[in-house]
Image: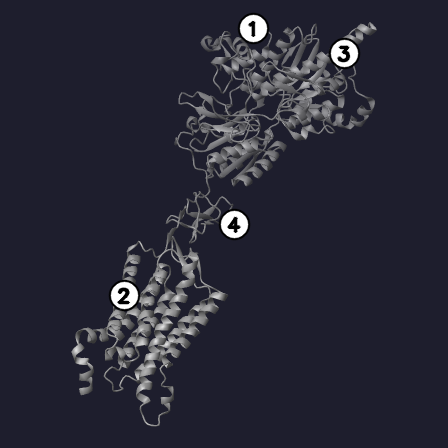
Amino acid sequence: MLLHIQKSNSQLFSSFLLSLLLQLSGSELRTGNLPCFHQINPIVSQEGDLVIGIFLSLFSVKVNSATGAELFENPPNEACKPYQWLHKNYQQALALLFAVEEINRDPHLLPNISLGFHLYNTYHSDERTLESSLRWLSGQGQPVPNYSCRKQDKSVAVIGGVTSALSVQMGTLLNLYKFPQISYGPFDSVLSDKVQFPSLYQMAPKDTSLPQGVVHLMVYFEWNWIGLVVSDDMRGEKFLWEIRGEMVKKGVCASFTEKIPVSERTHTESYETFMPRIITSAVKVIVVHGDTDSLMILRHSQVPYFQIWKVWIATSHWDITMRPLHTQGHAFHGALTFSYLTREIPGFKTFLKTVTPLKYPDDGLLRGFWLSAFRCSDQPAYLQQEICSPNASLENLPLCSFDMTMSGFSYTIYNSVYAMAWALHEISARKSETKSMENEEYLEPHSWQLHPFLKKTHFTNNAGDQVFVDETRNSEVQYAIMNYVFFLNETDALVKVGQFLPKAPFGQDFTICEDAIVWGWWDAKVPCAVCSDSCGPGFRKTPLEGQPTCCFDCSPCPEGEISSQKNAEQCTKCPEDEYPNKQRDRCLPKVVTFLNVEEPLGMTLTFMAFSLSLLTALVLGVFLKFQDTPIVKANNRTLSYTLLISLIFCFLCSLLFIGHPTTATCLLQQTVFGVVFTVAVSSILAKTIIVVLAFKGIRPGSRIRMFMHPRVSVYVVLICSGLQVIFCGIWLGTSPPFPEADTHSQYGHIILKCNEGSAFAFHCVLGYMALLALGSFIVAFLARNLPDTFNEAKFITFSMLVFCSVWASFLPTYQSTRGKAMVTVEIFSILASSTGLLGCIFIPKCYVILLKTDRYTQGQIKNK
């Protein structure tokens, strides 16, 4: 009987079907020595009013090692030797059976209509996938395109496609007949193209966040040097592109990338190429992405290599517990795997516990699985009753053979069967209404009629989850992070140690219990998977030329900069009021410092200033008391008083430099100092000029007599001091001194000081004062030998020598010091120079006045 297909479609694809027939003919010839392959299509059938075809991967082509040794156990039938059971995938067949039985018992879903299924095995082979699909379309017997051997067309849809490649192969053929195909394999955006695959529906949740979760795990454990192993197909390429992007964002580098071919023919060839590179690499953490069948070569290749000491991160579609032999689990001990986080279907575990060959005596597949999973022989002579008893339970099988927890694939198959049942329920309800209205007989729906109903199907499954057939409304998958543990007694287990919920709020999306993780045989600590050791605080990363960003050297932070975190890209400068500690890992607040009157140095200088000013005041008192004595009268008493008063202020002006700098003190410091000292030096200059005039003017006819006026000394002091006042006024009017905080002169300190404002004005004031002092020194030096009992020239010469020496050493010392030392140097220079003037000029006179009064009376002077 012709299947439902339009003639135009037959003409368009006649060439394709012809080539397909040629392929299948070749396949028949090539598999002629494998009668087991022909005997198991379909391997299980359950008839019903409506039949679903389902394609599961229950057997796989046997993979041999490079030496040709067969490492996988043989199926019970010797004719099936080139194939081996994939025991754990049998749960998917039981999930199908469980869903069909639930639906057939449900009086509200497909009432009066029984649902059946035909189960086919699928291989990673394009030819065999197409052949199995044609057998489903044609019925039992030879696969003939466009013909069906069924007496009545009960087939409505197909559930299949454990991988994207198989879904594409099946969809290419089934789409010719508008046959609905539900893919239970991983979600693939390529299959969402309804132009290319209009009859294909994906039931698996979207796993676009898987790369983010894997990289999140890397970042959590501070791994940045990772190996990537992916299957060499479309999904592998997509995952590789996405995870590389996430790794770049988080600063994680890939040491190597290996692509495992999915073709069965190249397994042995690829073993000798990529496995040595993986195992001999120094990388300690390897991410593996692919489906279980394609990655079985990894399990096979671990036999010669026991101590590889690596942590494997497996993604959701590789069942890491599946292995060829019961004793090959040690190599993946400590692996972490991202598994689908699904709710438990009520009654499923109870159903699995009750499944036995006695319960389903007509199920030859169950019997074959039972004999293989319990490691029995098919011959009665070798039957081991204690192991292979039909009353045994699936929960007694090790994890590598069977898992009592529903897998992600089984969960999707369960939902797929229910989605098909609800779509059939809707179309049956519509046909029942039409039949009652038109009084026609009920006819089975055609497969192409199912599409409008299937697209709109959504329901809540028995676990309470919302299920949508519309791919645009599919939810994002949630992941449980499982730790694979292989025990010394050769049993294994998957222990949940965390979870990744992409849609959860930040901070709650990724959780992991580090203490619950078993890392491997070699160490209980978290492995260190880095290219370069971390740069500690106080250092920064220095990239290595030609190397990935994860490979670097560590360099100390420059002076004045810190890095408070590990692996800092750049060091940061401390704020102005802080400074780095010796380790350069944090900033410390700088100590605010100035010449404080409360500290010892400040107290000492203050005491000295007051003491010397008091001493000067006493000298002034002595001069005032003995003002009529010849020694006081000599050299102009007014100038002596002026000089003594100015010296008092010279000592006191040093107090302006002690204490917290303010705007007022900064304005007064240098200007008062400059003016007062100018008055003092001007008074000394006037004294020396008076001495010279006094001795030079007594000569008959001397022109100097015209300058001998009582007010000459006053004019000298006023003019010289007035010029200094003008300089200071200009200084204050243009660029006055101001208080500032010096944060750079002294490490770890903020020095509060007065900024001169204009350095030029400051040096002009000092220079003018130095010019007056130099003039006084020269004049006094020239007049030092003039004959006179009270000639002050000698004392002035010596005092000005001291004065000039002090201030000559002051300038270079002042420029070379910083902070409080600058202030201290200036105060010391003020006190020292003032003391020199006081001591050299007035102390000898006080000595004479107080102790030698009888020697310098007016009568004795006249007698001399």
Label 4 SS: loop
Real-space Cα distance between discs 4 and 2?
73 Å
Q: Earlier in the sequence, mark 3 or mark 2?
A: 3
- The structure residue drawn at horizontal position 31% and vertical position 81%, both measured from the top left corner, is 780
The type of residue carrying mark 4 is Gly
- Depth check: 755 or 837 in front? 837
Q: Could you classify mark 4 by the number of other residues whose Cα lies within 10 Å: few (under 14), some (14-19), or many (20 or more)?
A: few
- Amino acid on which the number 3 mark rests in the picture: Arg
Q: Which residue is mark 1?
A: 359
Describe the element under mark 2 as helix, strand or loop.
helix
Q: Nearer the viewer, mark 1 or mark 2?
A: 2
The image quadrant where one finds the C terminus is bottom left
Circle 3 residue: 430
Q: Quadrant of the N terminus?
A: top right
Residue 330, x across and y down, in percent: 44, 27
Q: Amino acid at mark 1?
A: Lys
Name the residue that disc number 2 marks.
612
First-in-chain label (3 vs 1): 1
579 vs 477, left or right, is left
